[in-house]
Amino acid sequence: MMKTNGQLEPTVFVIFGGAGDLTWRKLGPALFDLSRDQSMPAEFSIIAVDGLGMSDEKLRRRLHDGVKKFSRHGKMQGDEWNEFARHIHYQQGDFKKLQTYTALGEQCAKLEKEWGAKVHRIFYMATPPSMFGEIPKYLGKAGLARDREWSRIVVEKPIGYDLESARALNAVLAANFEECQIFRIDHYLGKETVQNILAFRFANPLFEPLWNRRYVDYVTITAAEEIGVEHRGGYYDHAGALRDMVQNHLMQLLCLVAMEPMVSFNADEIRNKKVDVLHAVRPIHPDAVHQSVVRGQYGPGWIGGREVIGYREEDGVSPDSQTETFVALRLFVDNWRWQGVPFYLRTGKRLTRQASEIAIQFHAVPHQSFPPEASLDWQPSRLVMSIHPDQGIVLRFQAKHPGPKMHLRSVEMKFNYQDAFAVRSPDAYETLLWDVMKNDATLFMRTDQVEAAWRLLMPVLDVWAVAPPGDFPNYAAGTWGPEDAQSLLAQGHSWPLPVELATHGEKKKKNS
Ligand code: BG6
């Protein structure tokens, strides 16, 4: 029998949309991996609620398939699956009928009796976004939201489609739950390397004194994907890269890089510091949208020796779609620390290679004392925090090239997570689900943060809505995006080529 973590109290995990893609691909594997790592409570139950007629057995087979494909642990041993699967139950139910919720309440009460203990109720909305505004209302009506210590709701992105709809959704949530019961997921925050930004900045005295306008010339934040829209064309064509990636993931990275040191490791303290950054970002004036933001859409091209179709040919995408699959923007954080330092953000699908990273580019030395021939390929120091798929930190600096003459060359000092810790990082969802169970909201988005991010981007969305791009598709799949992305950069600045950290062996494994 598997050992379990005795410290977590009994928990019922209700997943609305339990037969759907997110549960199959992410939630099932994450819960299984937590259970394998003995990180689930000793008493827990997973209730998958969905409209389809399905038996417990059929649901378990579906989740088993997801675990086999996506679990971090890969192969299951012995009785591991059966041991986990006995906790999974299916409940057919209409999300818009009170009866579904009263049945859930009864089920929880039954488990409390069986386990002889009060249970934590976690309600996870893994449904299409159209249900996000409905489910909380019914949970409220059924009295399942009342207990602030024991009841929590998890909301997936997108949190709204724009500022107005985000506010409306937040209002429904607030009418039924207290803010401390609401866990808004941004899976980037569950990534080890994203959490490591705080550790790196605030657990080491080394770089923080340099982390400001006096030493930093500019910052680039890149989230590049090789994949296209895959099977999500229908959703993506209504969202686009600005809503899908910038409003949430890139804004979170910006906050972590630019925030002031927190006073304590407390959820609200950290979130306050992050929101301060968003409040300090200089608003983009509607007249300046075209100078500050560049959008793109991929056409056909080649990636990794394979020919791929253009965005407009993808399933579920309109053949004359004006949706952006690439965005680059230039922002300024108007405070003492960052005045005048550009933050360049970019994200896109079907780019040359997958790479999420933050590059801090330091100023040139104030006075060049080496002879000109010594520093022919001189480059300023740069620190890169590599988030995904390579994980680690690379510091580029100048060193003397061996030989009788003084000749400077750029060299790199690398920290690779895999090498340093020799353990595989948990999947972001594992970390986040574990935090929900522990009732720790540090890695989740608060109402004000979500709304501040939308507020910043609204001028862009408004201007784009009335000024269609006209030149789409404007980059070939397999490139680094539209040429225009260069126009955002000040003289002497550049979009860095992503660093490579994976060792030769790892790369071979990845490609095989
Ligand atoms: C999701 C977006 O939030 O993040 C996807 O909806 C995107 O379009 C994904 O592919 C990227 O996440 P990751 O963890 O693969 O970098």
Image (spheres, rainbow, N blue to C red):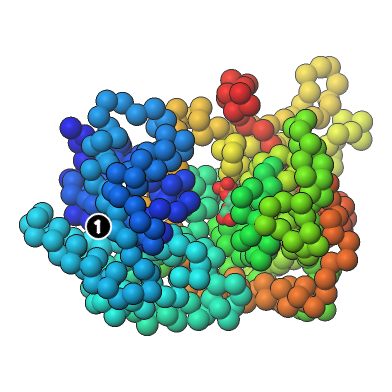
Is residue 104 placed above or below 225 in the rendered structure?
Answer: below
Quickly name the residue at label 1.
12
Where residue 203 appears, x then y in whole percent?
46, 48
Foreground: 258 or 123?
123
> In the picture, which quadrant includes the N terminus?
top left
Q: Which residue occupies 82% across, 45% down?
A: 300
Residue extending furthest toward the top = 403
Callout 1 amino acid = Val
What is the quadrant of residue 283 in the picture?
A: bottom right
What is the quadrant of residue 427 in the picture?
A: top left
Is residue 15 placed above or below 497 in the rendered structure?
Answer: below
Q: Which residue occupies 83% across, 74% down?
A: 467
Q: Which residue occupies 10% across, 54% down?
A: 115
Q: Is residue 230 visible?
A: yes
Where residue 363 appears, x then y in whole percent?
76, 50
SS class, disc 1:
strand
Q: Which residue occupies 55% across, 45% down?
A: 206
